Image (cartoon, grey):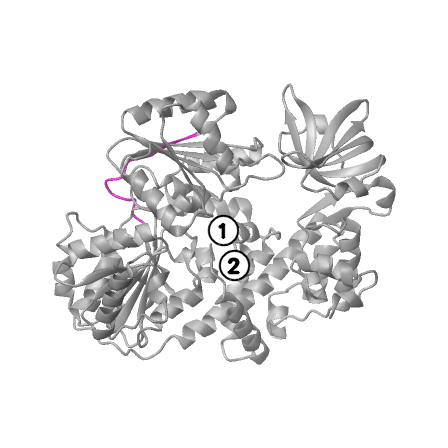
Amino acid sequence: MRLTDLKYVSEKKEKYFNKLGVYSQEDLLRLFPRDYLDMTKTSDIFGLYNNEMALVRCEVVNTEVNRYARRPYVKALCRQGDTLFEAIWFNQMYVASTLKLGEYLFYGRVRNRYGMGASMVNPTFERLDSVKNLQGIVPVYPLTEGLTQGAVRQAVRQAVNNVPVRTLVPFPLVKKYKLYDLQTAYKKIHCPSSPQDIGAAGERIAIEEYFVLISAFKMIKGDRQVARRHFYGVTEGDVVEFIGRFPFEFTRGQREAVKAVLDDLHSPAAMNRLLQGDVGCGKTAVALAAIYMAVKSGYQAAMLAPTEVLARQNAALIERYLPEYNVRFLSGTTPAAEKREIKKGLKEGSVNVVCGTHAVIQKDVEMSALSLVVCDEQHRFGVAQRSALGEKGDSCDSLIMSATPIPRTLSLVFYGDLDVTTIREKPRARQEISTSVIGKNKYYAMLDWISKETKKGRQAYFVCPQIEGDDEGTVMSVTDLYDDLAKAMPGVKFALLHGKLPDKKKDEIMEDFRAKKYDCLVSTTVIEVGVDVPDATVMVIYNAERFGLSQLHQLRGRVGRGSVKSYCFLIMGNDSEQARERLAVLKDNSDGFAIAESDLKMRGGGDFMGTRQSGHILSELKNLRFPVSALFTAKALSDEAFSGAFDISGLRAAAAEKYDKLKNIVLN
């Protein structure tokens, strides 16, 4: 159904909706509210926490426009009672033509800093006389230039009545599990009568999404149970001898993981296994054992890594522990003559193992006897990329590794097509990392202490969530931070690293940091995955409340890799109680899986999914906060649906379409 079939939606307005990713009425139905307003509850702006979101009733008494500032802005002087405050919109010049004098409702982030007065940054707004008919719980939608909340609400209300929504859950199961009507759920998510409506509707929509996705993975997993084409002659004794090459004793988790791989390689079906574990738990050693099993049996193995630095590190380890085999490194920066030599060796079979980046999956890379594919840090690759590497062999065995702890609950969805092995032991010979939340009153003392540490030969990371910061001024820009630190810490050598730099430049900076040409690295989260830097003993994370706890734990794991005591400092941009509660979990806990479970419980399944998996097919649910029970319900429904007692032809078609979309997505 076209958007222009809706009343008041012209072709011009349709283009504005397109900017939000909305191209049809069906898409409009899935434009979930990013928040809700309780029209009966407005706040006193001067009684709110700094960075708290609030609904404020006020009068606009004056406006100011500056189109020539470094960040152009529109500013309004507002009155609430007998007190004045400012509202400011950065890079939203269209506000100037929309905002008039008079009474408004503002909804947005409040800046209320002691001694500096209160203000609001980039609030959404509606004239009070235009919302008099809005009562109870009102949805707030994402906007773009050319759209108002009123226009989006009006369009969504029409779509809710126009678009038929049918569940793919067989009717007997709908009845058995007493599921909320799906059409009603969509109506309630957009037009709730109470907060309870939002929760029930969000959970029902989430159950449907998970039901289809888990069913898609169930189909894929069944399809992947193909007959084994590669037969491994390696014995358990061979593997025990290989493990003896390491200068440490394998943990129980590592031994169990190696056994699971060996059993898979001797099973009738090709291996498709995920190996997950906390930072430094020894997954790479297990991967090396798997590679040994392949080459010992006369086959080739390939190991894919997301960065050139990590790929080089993996190649060096394989050369060290498998010196009798020909191991080569291949990346986009490999010289042309060397590339031709490596490709020739892979095609002829004289190269036993290749380690590399995306260059390994290029079409002109052919391998004569590839049987095993190892994908390191799998969350950096999409399904299609992993499949492209496996297709260079005939029904290859796959071992996929992740250092990002995923609760078992979510692994049902993320990795429904994989067998999962988890190494749970704490890393051995790793330093405990002291974690602290640093307030503004201790910030410069922390910088002074870090400066002194660099004089002892220590190194530090300073991490920001974004390259540019945000228009609200609440997120630190990595480039601004780099400049600020250089001024605050004279004599300290800084490097700047972020995702917009060319891959070659990023790798050079990381290598130079590792070689101690720099004391400190100011970076975005591109350093979440990287080489070991034993002298890096300090991690400082800005706007820490904006990260998932598991990602914070992953970043923290960049330090504590040497023999010296290490530290992690968390700096909040939002000093709310909720933010402090979340960061306290990280401060008091070093178990990545326990942290991930806590994060899931505190933030809810939808928020966890949307935040962790940027670009994931489920990120469309990121604004729905629903209980984790939705996952269990969906899993149970899918298991019963595939029992053979129901007609699921419609479900199979929808699940195939869902996976088709998923396989083209590259996860960040």
Residue at 27%, 79% in the rendered image: 229
In this figure, which residue is indicated by the disc labeled 1? 612
- Residue 212 visible, this orientation: yes
Instruction: Tell me: residue 141, above or below residue 168.
Output: above
Three-letter code for the amino acid on which mark 1 is drawn: Arg
Residue furthest to the top in view is 115
- Judge from the rendering whether residue 134 lies leftward or rightward of residue 519; answer left or right: right
In this figure, which residue is indicated by the disc labeled 2? 616
Residue at 38%, 39% in the rendered image: 556
- Sort mark 2 into few (<14), some (14-19) or many (20+) by Cα contacts within 10 Å: many
Instruction: Tell me: residue 596, above or below residue 324.
Output: above
Q: Which residues are magenta?
A: 424-436
- Judge from the rendering whether residue 528 lies leftward or rightward of residue 573; answer left or right: left
Callout 1 secondary element:
helix
Callout 2 secondary element:
loop
- Judge from the rendering whether residue 492 lies leftward or rightward of residue 481; answer left or right: left
What mark, if any, has residue 321 been given in the picture? Answer: none
- Judge from the rendering whether residue 324 lies leftward or rightward of residue 44; answer left or right: left
Q: Overall secondary structure of the magenta stretch? A: loop
Q: Is 430 colored magenta in this rendering?
A: yes
Q: In which quadrant of the rendered image does the N terminus lie?
A: bottom right
Q: Is 44 colored magenta in this rendering?
A: no
Task: Check whether the beta carbons of the residues at disc 1 and disc 2 lie within 8 A of each other.
Answer: yes
